Image (cartoon, grey):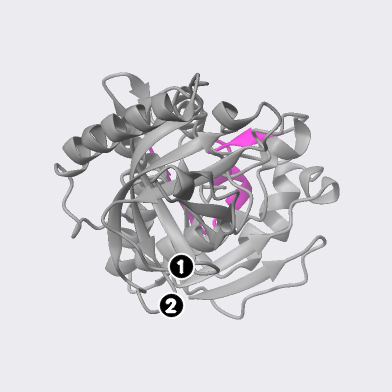
Amino acid sequence: MKIINLQFPNKYSAKKKEFVLAMGYFDGLHLGHRAVIQQAKRIADKQHLKLALLTYSQSPAGFYVNDPVLKVPILPFRQKMQMLEKLGVDTIFLIDYNLAFGSQSPEDYVDNYLAKLGASVVVAGFDHTYGSLKDKADMKHLPRYANGRFEVYTVGECSDYFGKISSTRIRRLLSEGDLQAVNELLGYQFQTVGFVVHGNQIGRRIGFPTANQALEEKQLLPKSGVYAVRTKIVTGPLAGRSFNGMASIGRNETFGSDNPITIEINLFDFSADVYDEEIIVYWISFLREQVKYANAEALIDQLKQDRIDSLDLLKEIPKSKNYS
């Protein structure tokens, strides 16, 4: 898959029309986003064209809103690119979103970008908008701005019993720790990607050694708590192996009130050294809130129960499941 970085003003101009172009930020690549990309792929296959995607290096909404949650993606960039390649995307047009780009009128955006990217067809969701905040337009306006230079295809709302499937809804569910609902809306297991780093060794001292994960990129995390997880080792002698486990997001308050927030994973039936190795943690289900215990013995008793609860949940999900 090829990635073409676009700046403002745009100097790129395709020599021929060879793409069906899907556009959007696609934060999280949830089922609604996949519906857009899959529809674009069907059109591309039918018309014997390649599939391209126009997206952004950061959230356009987060660019304007002083909300740190909106500035952090649901899915790390590298993982998103890998998933897009699996979905059959041939080329990514990646825009470095900035104030100048975001100040364009809808017509200028179409003239300066969409019309120059070699698109025979442009596809987006029904609620996709473009242009400046003041003058932004939606998909109903795009055929007029296209002016015959490319066809326009709009994908309708993707919803379930509870309403529209959206990144906003997934973010809320993550803040509530409802990973089962999050995973249903994503269509894959929510995941964090990073390297195993040295911690304070508390887990090892109480009989529950942990792999502390330092994130490779900033990304949104579920709320603090204890979760059933499955962890894949990406590098090193155990690369490709997956292990059941349980993970904690929190400050380890039983052993101090000023600890930083950490991601600690206890892998079941595991004793290897994976320091500095890359791991992917797949977050399966919330177990319980973080609790400050009176002593280490009380914590150990709870961790034993957490292991039992985790195994009960994880046995329903086979290791051969395709997480992405």
Residue under pointer 1: 274
Q: Is residue 138 above or below residue 232?
A: above
Q: Which amino acid does label 1 sit on?
A: Val
Residues packed near mark 2 inside 10 Å, few (<14), some (14 to 19) or many (20 plus): few
- Quadrant position of the C terminus in the picture: bottom left
Q: In this view, does 256 lie above or below 220?
A: above
Task: Determine the residue positioned at 49% across, 58% down.
Answer: 80
The answer to whether any part of residue 63 appears in the image is yes
Q: Which of marks 2 and 1 is nearer the N terminus?
A: 2
Which quadrant of the figure has residue 30? top left
Q: How many marks?
A: 2
State yes or no: residue 149 in magenta. yes
Task: Determine the residue positioned at 55% across, 78% down.
Answer: 16
User: Which contiguous range is marked in magenta?
Assistant: 136-155
In percent of width and height, residue 227 lies at: 37, 35
Q: Which amino acid does label 2 sit on?
A: Gly
Instruction: Pick the residue in front: 11 or 205.
Output: 205
In percent of width and height, residue 54 lies at: 57, 58
In percent of width and height, residue 69 lies at: 65, 33
| Marker disc for residue 236 | 2
**Horizontal arrangement in the rendering, residue 307 relative to residue 51 (left or right):** left
Instruction: Pick the residue in front: 71 or 258.
Output: 258
Q: Are marks 2 and 1 in contact (CB under 8 Å)?
A: yes
| Marker disc for residue 184 | none
| Secondary structure type for disc 1 | loop
- Residue that sits furthest to the right in the current view: 100
State yes or no: residue 253 in magenta. no
